[in-house]
Image (spheres, helix red, strand yellow):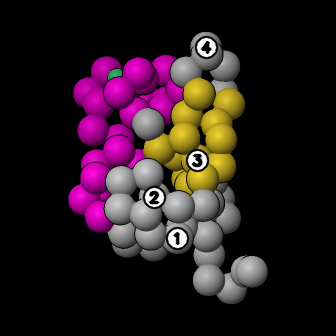
């Protein structure tokens, strides 16, 4: 897994910058998660561990899906 991000907004929101929470599902300020395949998702803060996969960056619009897939 590389750590390249399309923009600073994505880098910020996909990186753990919270001193309190270890899990993005517990932190209301942590919006973006990445799964093992490198797919991005938006965390659904409903108390569970759900997220919605996103294919484009919500901030800059860059396509996020891995390039080796169509
Ligand atoms: Zn937090
Ligand atoms: Zn972006």
4 vs 1, front mark: 1
- Residue 3 showing in the rendered view: no
Q: Secondary structure at mark 3?
A: strand
2 vs 4, front mark: 2
- Find out whether the residues at labels 1 and 3 contact each other: C-beta distance under 8 Å: no
Q: Which mark is residue 31?
A: none
Count residues near mark 1 (Cα–Cα under 10 Å), then give few for <14, some for 14-19, many for 20+. Answer: few
Residue drawn at x 43%, y 63% is: 61
Q: Which mark is residue 63?
A: 1
On the image, which quarter does residue 39 sit in?
bottom right
The reply to whether the magenta stretch includes residue 27 is: yes
Q: Is residue 18 above or below residue 28?
A: below
Identify which residue, 12 or 23, lies in the foreground: 12
- In space, the residues marked 2 and 1 are separated at their CA atoms by 6 Å
- In space, the residues marked 3 and 2 are separated at their CA atoms by 10 Å
Residue 52 position within the rendered picture, expressed as x and y whole percent measured from the top left: 65, 41
- Mark 3 highlights which residue? 41
* Residue lying farthest to the top in this orientation: 47
Residue drawn at x 35%, y 27% is: 29
Q: Which residues are magenta?
A: 7-30
Q: Which mark is residue 57?
A: 2
Residue 67 position within the rendered picture, expressed as x and y whole percent measured from the top left: 62, 83
Point out the tag, 2 or 1, that comes first from the N-terminus.
2
């Amino acid at each position: 897994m590389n750590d390249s991000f399309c923009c600073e907004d994505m880098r910020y929101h996909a990186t753990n910058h919270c001193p309190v929470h270890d899990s993005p599902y517990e932190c209301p300020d942590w919006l973006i998660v990445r799964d093992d395949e490198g797919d991005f998702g938006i965390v659904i803060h409903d108390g569970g561990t759900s997220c919605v996969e996103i294919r484009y960056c919500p901030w800059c619009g860059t396509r996020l899906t891995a390039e080796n897939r169509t």
